[in-house]
Image (tube, grey):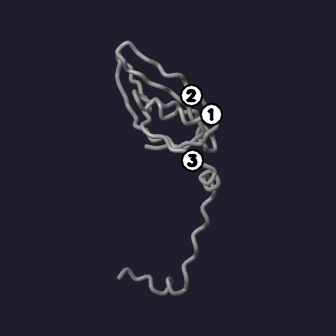
Amino acid sequence: MELIGRVKLIRDEQAFASGFTKREFVITTEEQYPQDIQFELLKEKGNLITAYQPGDRVKVFFDIRGREYQGKYYNSLVSWKLESQGVEATATAGAPMPPPMPPTAAEMEDDLPF
């Protein structure tokens, strides 16, 4: 899955006794009602976010993971790739699509499926 938004927050890396590390970050989506979505970067992928700053526009590629613990269910969004969405992407993103062109007279005459 993928989602485009602006980096809102980058947390410090967390290291656990087992040697496992993760880093969390939050992006704000660009929709009528923006959402703040938190993602995780696991192990060596934690370095992917170091190239970005709050306010940068990015495309986040991620997987949804779920688990059960003591009868409760939890979800996490685990990112595995980030791409910068530069100025040229900003100019076209969210731009309305032009309306479809009406059919020509020739297209309207020959509407048989064979």
Decide which of tag 1 and tag 2 comes sooner along the chain.
2
Q: Which residue is mark 1?
A: 54
Q: Are marks 3 and 1 in contact (CB under 8 Å)?
A: no
Residue in the image at 63% along x and 40% along y: 33
Q: Which residue is mark 3?
A: 85
Q: Badge 3: few (under 14), some or many (20 or more) residues near its Cα, within 10 Å?
A: some
Q: Which residue is mark 2?
A: 10
The amino acid sitting under disc 2 is Ile
Q: Is residue 55 left or right of residue 76?
A: right
Q: Is residue 17 above or below residue 82?
A: above
Q: Badge 2: few (under 14), some or many (20 or more) residues near its Cα, within 10 Å?
A: some
Q: Position of residue 10 (x, y in %)?
A: 56, 28
Q: Is residue 89 left or right of residue 18?
A: right
Residue in the image at 40% along x and 15% along y: 16
Q: Position of residue 46 (x, y in %)?
A: 46, 29
Q: Quadrant of the N terminus?
A: top left
The amino acid sitting under disc 3 is Gln
